Amino acid sequence: MTAPGPRGRRGLHEVLTSAGAVAGGGRAGLVDTLGLPAAARYVVLLVDGMGEELLREHAHLAPFLSSLPSVPDVVCGVPSTTVTSLTSLGTGLRAGVHGVVGYTSRVPETGRRLNALAWDQDVDALQWQRHPTVLQRLHEAGVNAGSVNEARFEGTGLTLCSQRGAPFHGVGSIWERLDVVAEVVEDAASSVVYAYESRLDHAGHAHGCTSQEWRDVLVTVDRETAQLRDLLPPDTVLLVTADHGMVDLPAEGRFDVSTTPALLEGVDLLAGEARFRHLYTARHDREAVAARWRDFCGERADVRTRDELDDWFGPIDPAVAGRIGDVVVAALGDFAVFSTDDFPLEMRMKGFHGSVSEAELRVPVLLAT
């Protein structure tokens, strides 16, 4: 089965560029492609894991967020995973250009697997993602731009890829974040401030995105977001978005490739995550591996070779092509590809994302004016 991709749809990579174009008055050469409301100041709050479909299904638990107007039909991009989405948001580019192509991916120079969240290889983030960030462009153009995030994220590989080049304001608690965002946005007549909220995603992975634990966190996030809006100056737009949605996976949909060694013939390295696998092969093995996986998965996955990915990744820069699997396996329905040999902790999770379903791709772009 061939799954729909984000070609021709509005993308998360347009969100911060559009906010920056409005608040910065075009000084950084950015363009408002989303048609955002005029405002001198913007706060862009990203709630990790708060997909559009999940939010609408639980609207009664989030009365503030659900009351806000939204830019319609925005997708996060492929793969629908945090490291890729944060870098797309932060650079205004799609994954085929910025090169953060998955939760884990191959380092072509070493053949080793990089975890882009943990940044567990000796890889220079400034070389891995060479493009200036949106915040950097705004800051260099004289706009008051910065990010507010947990202090432990300062200087990490992912932060350098997605938010470098502008002041980073580290905080130690939710309440401190609320105050610091309000203080930073008030520092100048025009401001763009990015902030990040992680608890909903953590609850989804640990307990499932239909669990009571997940619902409780959504109630809290909704209340705190309303409080943030109240703290901001009246000429500020609070834009709330997300990096991906999430789905829960039943036990019967969890395929462990370690039990079927024939599928790994010709595969030198397995990366990505359960809902979106990168398979790295010798070039002459690519088509054979793809055919074998298509036969095995049938309609449970969309299996593509690297040269079939432009509608998902955007045009692929040759400089980053080797980081993308020679074959990728995008899980559909309740299916996912696990490997207890390579990723033993994934089987413990309840909620997942990464693939191309609407539940995973669609993200809200909510506007609190």
Image (cartoon, grey):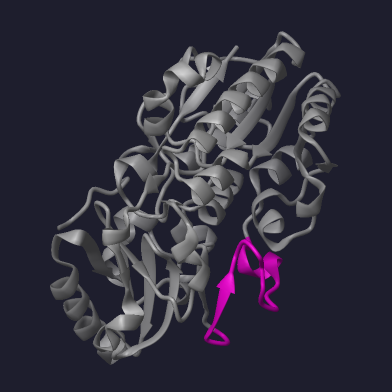
> In this picture, is 1 found above or below 193?
below
* Residue 39, image quadrant: top right
Residue occupying image coordinates x 80% and y 37%: 173
> In this picture, is 43 found above or below 28?
above
Point out the stretch of residues depicted in magenta: 109-130
* Residue 89, image quadrant: top right
Please state the horizontal and vertical placement of residue 81, each as a whole percent of the image: 48, 53
> In this picture, is 265 found above or below 272?
below
Q: Is residue 134 visible?
A: yes
Residue occupying image coordinates x 45% and y 73%: 271
Does the magenta portion include 27? no
Please state the horizontal and vertical placement of residue 52, each as a whole percent of the image: 41, 31
Please state the horizontal and vertical placement of residue 279, each as a whole percent of the image: 36, 77
Residue occupying image coordinates x 72% and y 8%: 234
Magenta segment's dominant SS is loop
Front residue of 284 and 112: 112
Q: Quadrant of the N terminus?
A: bottom left
Residue occupying image coordinates x 41% and y 37%: 210
Does the magenta portion include 125? yes
Does residue 212 appear left or right of residue 22 in this picture?
A: left
Does residue 91 appear left or right of residue 61 in this picture?
A: right
Please state the horizontal and vertical placement of residue 208, each as a whole percent of the image: 45, 45
Front residue of 26 and 206: 206
Q: Is residue 314 visible?
A: no
Q: Quadrant of the C terminus?
A: top right
> In this picture, is 267 found above or below 43?
below
How many discs appear?
Answer: 0
